[in-house]
Amino acid sequence: MNPPQIVSADQWLVARKQLLAKEKELTRRRDELARERRALPWVRIEKPYAFEGAAGKQTLSDLFAGRSQLAVYHFMLGPGWKEGCPSCSLLSDHLDGTLPHLAARDVTLAAVSRAPYAEILPFKQRMGWHFDWVSSHDSDFNRDFHVSFSKEELHSGAFDYNYGKNGFPSEEAPGISVFAKDDSGAVFHTYSAYARGGEPLIAAYYILDMVPKGRNEEGLPWPMAWVRHHDRYGTSAA
């Protein structure tokens, strides 16, 4: 690993302060984007989506678990898959620790996949996760929120994902969707993000961004090709 430049502590401090000014500007801009995100209009959910999880059959309203805000992670695990997406798993490794903090701010977090719940549960247990994870297998939820695609769509190479006609290499795609419930019990869709839009949930990436080698993904077949399930690093499967 070769350093960009070797300098004195005083010279380093000058360069660091210059970078700090840019970091502060990014923080201010991120705060403004968050305000704009919260100001987006809402869409009332009229369709009676059905889910199955540890609590049995549930509606979208049930997933709120008594709170007024719900964040759903669209986890890539399709029917018949032997295990979940490694990249979604990297993100999900960060979720359990957020649960009590989100609950204290009136937010429930859940993952949703199209695989039947009987196929979700063994993988969830293997990974040791505790967040609520339900199946949307018997509803249109994944298709309506543009994270599941037909074979015909995949063959076409361009379909509705991430707010445009984009390709994706799998019948399942990642994303995060946010919902709100008013005092009458009506449920509204307030926000969704796809592709790299979910990256802020991956704290490991932000630590990697601070270290000298960074994410070190140059030359890989795709940026997250290095990612493994957390029980697969150092094994032949890696």
Image (cartoon, helix red, strand yellow):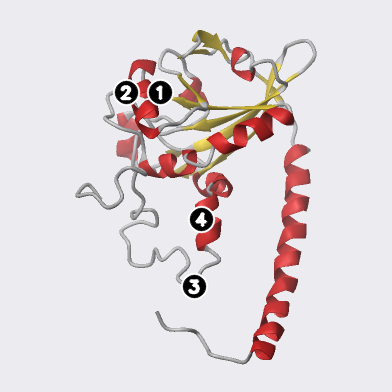
Query: Rounded to the nearest whole Å, what is the CA distance between mark 3 and mark 2?
Result: 40 Å
Identify the residue at horizontal 72%, vertical 72% (top origin). Answer: 20
Position of 194 compared to 24: left or right? left
Q: Nearer the viewer, mark 4 or mark 1?
A: 4
Contact between labelled residues 3 and 1, with CB atoms less than 8 Å apart: no
Residue 229 sits above or below residue 5 on the image: above
Query: Rounded to the nearest whole Å, what is the CA distance between mark 1 and mark 3?
Result: 39 Å
| Image position, residue 233 (x, y; %) | 31, 50
Q: Nearer the viewer, mark 3 or mark 2?
A: 3
Residue that badge 4 annotates: 205
Q: Residues within 10 Å of mark 2 (few under 14, many from 20)?
A: some
**Camera-side residue: 165 or 207?**
207
Q: Which mark is residue 114?
A: 1
Contact between labelled residues 1 and 2, with CB atoms less than 8 Å apart: yes
Residue that badge 2 annotates: 79
Query: Rounded to the nearest whole Å, what is the CA distance between mark 4 and mark 1?
Result: 27 Å
Q: Amino acid at mark 2?
A: Pro
Q: Amino acid at mark 3?
A: Pro
Give the mark nearer the N terminus: 2 vs 4. Answer: 2
Label 3 SS: loop
Q: Nearer the viewer, mark 1 or mark 3?
A: 3
**Camera-side residue: 65 or 157?**
65
Label 1 SS: loop
Give the mark nearer the N terminus: 4 vs 1. Answer: 1
Residue that badge 3 annotates: 212
Query: Would you identify the image quadrant in which residue 221 lies?
Result: bottom left
Q: Amino acid at mark 4?
A: Tyr
Label 4 SS: helix
Residue 95 sits above or below residue 65 on the image: below
